[in-house]
Image (tube, rainbow, N blue to C red):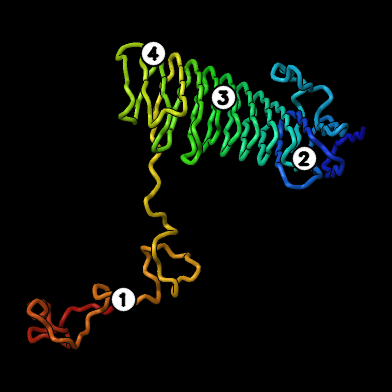
Amino acid sequence: MSEWSVAEPRKLTFDDPMTTLHVRIVNGTVNVVGTDEGSARLEVTEIEGPPLVVTHKDGTLTVAYDDLPWKGFLKWLDRKGWHRSAVVSLAVPAHTRVEVGVVGAGAMVSGIEGVTEVKGVTGDTTLVGLSGPVRAATVSGSVEAQGVTGELRLNSVSGDLTVIEGSCPFVKADSVSGSIILDLDPTSGPTDARLTNVSGEIAIRLPQPADAEVDANTASGTVSNAFDDLRVSGQWGAKKITGRLGGGSGRLRATTVSGSIALLRRPPAEDEPWEDRPRTAEADPEGTVPPEVPLKDETPTAATTPADPTADAGPLDERAAAAAPAADDGPTPDGPNDKKVL
């Protein structure tokens, strides 16, 4: 086993094979990114308080404090130990299993194909482009997942849970008072989504056309529905949105006690994308000018060509000329003019 004590900014490279990453810090930031490289790299750019202990043993890389265990992590509320901070960045092989725990720190994990698990007490978590199974739990911090394609399980007490352009085959999100927002990618296949809340709101945006069996209900909150094929029942107290969209291949279950539920429709894609519209290749060989903007070397149309002052005036031009005041070449017979020269 190799071990390092990091008490100041430092960089480390690990050439031995690794399969698992464990990170646990208090305050600061953790940034983990998956790469195609076989080695792993660690950079600690800022650190205050006790040193971080780095170990590499049997394919497992651990970056943590000795007094911050993974087991029972969310119950670690010893504020005497909060007077510390670290900014940690790691680049690991994409297939690595990643476990990150943060207390008051922000965490960002991207490009990981293996299993990802994040636990947070008050820090916000961002998950981007993960293709393996994902589990994230937080007390009061928010969790945002962007472009995740693996199974996704989110849990919070008061933190908001947000999924943007999700392509997950399975999504489960539970919260007590935080909001839950689910936005599904229109290019993804059927999704099995199960959302549960107590007092927080639930908002779901489905692609158009949608394909799901829908069952959403609230005990005392309000509901809104953007789909004509779904039925809204109940006017006082409990309300439900039920029905089938498309072939009903996916499943959507949403339940809240006093929070509101909103089913939104994603606008359909444009029939003719910008890049497919015709443009003048000679004037814009790299296609950087939008089609509606006239290109500089295009021949002006008749509507934009300046009028020839020597051309024969038509009836409308004659009347306009007669109505226009004569040129002011000098003083009028009644006296000098009062034209101001600017």
Question: Distance of mark 4 from mark 2, alpha carbons?
Answer: 48 Å
Quadrant of the rendered image containing residue 310? bottom left
Does dot 1 land on a helix, a strand or a loop?
Answer: loop
Packing grade of label 4 (10 A; few <14, some 14-19, many >=20) is some
Mark 4 residue type: Ser
Q: Nearer the viewer, mark 2 or mark 3?
A: 3
Quadrant containing the C terminus in the rendered view: bottom left
Q: Position of residue 63 (x, y in %)?
A: 81, 32
Quadrant of the rendered image containing residue 168? top right
Does dot 2 land on a helix, a strand or a loop?
Answer: strand
Q: Is residue 195 left or right of residue 216?
A: right
Mark linked to residue 218: none
* Mark earlier in primary sequence (1, 2): 2
Question: Distance of mark 1 from mark 2, alpha carbons?
Answer: 60 Å
Q: Are marks 4 and 3 in contact (CB under 8 Å)?
A: no
Packing grade of label 2 (10 A; few <14, some 14-19, many >=20) is some
* Mark earlier in primary sequence (4, 3): 3
* Mark earlier in primary sequence (3, 1): 3
Packing grade of label 3 (10 A; few <14, some 14-19, many >=20) is many
Residue identified by numbered label 2: 46
Residue identified by numbered label 3: 159
Q: Position of residue 48 (x, y in %)?
A: 79, 34
Mark linked to residue 300: 1
* Mark earlier in primary sequence (4, 2): 2
Q: Nearer the viewer, mark 1 or mark 2?
A: 1
* Mark earlier in primary sequence (2, 3): 2
Q: Nearer the viewer, mark 4 or mark 2?
A: 4
Question: Distance of mark 4 from mark 1, alpha carbons?
Answer: 63 Å
Residue identified by numbered label 4: 220
Question: Distance of mark 2 from mark 3, alpha carbons?
Answer: 27 Å
Nearest to the observer: residue 296 or residue 329: 296
Does dot 4 land on a helix, a strand or a loop?
Answer: loop
